[in-house]
Image (cartoon, rainbow, N blue to C red):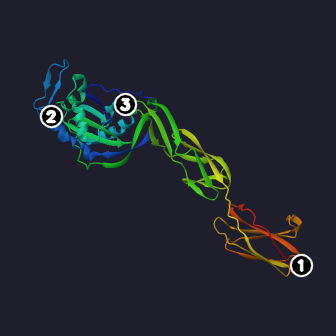
Amino acid sequence: MISGVLAVALAATMTILPTQPAEAATADYQVPVTYGQTEARKMIDMINGFRTGSDAWYWNQDNATKTTCANLGKLTYDYALEQAAMLRAAEIAVSFSHTRPNGTDCFDALSSLPLYTMGENIAAGQTTAAEAYTSWREDNYGYAGQGHRRNMLNSGFASVGIGHVVFNGIHYWVQNFGSPNTGAAATAAADGARTVSVAIDDATISQKALKPSATSLTVTAGKSVALPSASLSLTVRNRWPSSPLTLAASNPVWTSSNSSVAAISGNTVVGKKGGTATLTVKANGLQTRVKVTVKAVKPPATRLASVKGAKKSLKVKWKKQTKNVTGYEIWCSTSKKFTKKTTVKKAVKKAKTTSLTVKKLKAKKTYYVKIRTYHKIDGKKYYSKWSSVKKAKTK
């Protein structure tokens, strides 16, 4: 099990100064977490059993004598403290510290509450309330390692609220202590996915990058594919585990370097004609690029079924092709080379058509005939290869 813990307690009679300078730049980032408040609330009975049981003691600084905490009252559950703890749980998933990601002291999250004493315990990696509680008991530590224990046994606290989130598979826990109880109304336990807005001070971010889920795309002309997702990669101070924070980019805006080749349409890129273009995405003050290749449509070829001569005309039949086919083009020429002056060109605009009588030809002449399909996209025709040539003589 991966785990880590920190503890802090502070009396409200002390002046709490934010560590962030007034002019520091912050931005809001959307952090997707899963809350588990039903599990978190199980801890209140564990804490109160601890406070009123025989294990309510902690080492003194000499690590030779103990302070026994007699006659401790039970903590009440404070739903306003819980809301603050839930926010802090999302924040420590970003930066595992008693300094908030926006650079202020952790107690700034409680500043709107009518409290005169406050304390905070944070932990990460424990998958159940019992595991988190046990890690905070610190039974086998000396005085220096029992800060969490002393918070849970602090006679100056009257209430507690507990927050629990899961982010990227890691569980994060927060106990917020205070006195007096704020009297906030009870609420149902919040379980399930939520997106939490977390303010992060730019000074806590050492590296920032915008990354697409794909660096290149291929689409066929006339078709569309989904745009890649864009994510932010942030290297944040005190991140635990110490991997970059990955979040969805906020309101990404995509543009194309050549909309005649590849055009943006909603959340897709549409292939217009064969070629390449560069897609640029901008979000959160950053930008990155994706190469898109549009493949020209190559409609399937067809073949001539028969060519029969008639009076100054030819009756031409061919095999029907409908997939990626808009129509057909037929050339009839008195020259095997299909020169411009000797060739009659006819277009058939329906793919389901399979025959055509080519009229106004010269009488008693041998004509060479070939056919090809075409697919029309945005006014541009894409052609198949030519069929084999057949010949017939007019009457």
Left/right placement of residue 177 relative to residue 74 reads right
Residue 358: horizontal and vertical position, in percent?
A: 80, 76
Could one spot residue 75 in this view of the protein?
no
Pointer 3 residue: 104
Mark 3 or mark 2, which is nearer to you? Answer: 2
Q: Earlier in the sequence, mark 3 or mark 2?
A: 2
Assign the C terminus to one quadrant of the image.
bottom right
Q: Nearer the viewer, mark 2 or mark 1?
A: 1
Look at the picture and state if 253 lies above or below 265.
Answer: above
x%, y% of residue 249? 49, 43
Tell me which numbered mark, 1 or 3, is placed earlier along the sequence: 3
Dividing the picture into quadrants, the one containing residue 140 is: top left
Q: Amino acid at mark 3?
A: Thr
Residue behind mark 2 = 51
Q: Are marks 1 and 3 in contact (CB under 8 Å)?
A: no
Amino acid beneath label 1: Lys
Measure the alpha-carbon separation of dots 1 and 3: 97 Å
The answer to whether residue 389 is left or right of residue 161 is right
Closer to us: 22 or 125: 125
Residue under numbered circle 1: 364
Answer with the quarter of the image where residue 339 lies.
Answer: bottom right
Dot 2 falls on a residue whose secondary structure is helix
- Residue located at (56% from left, 40% from top): 287
Query: Quick one: label 3, few (<14), some, or many (20+) residues within 10 Å?
Result: some
- Camera-nearest residue between 362 and 318: 318
Against 341, is 70 above or below? Answer: above
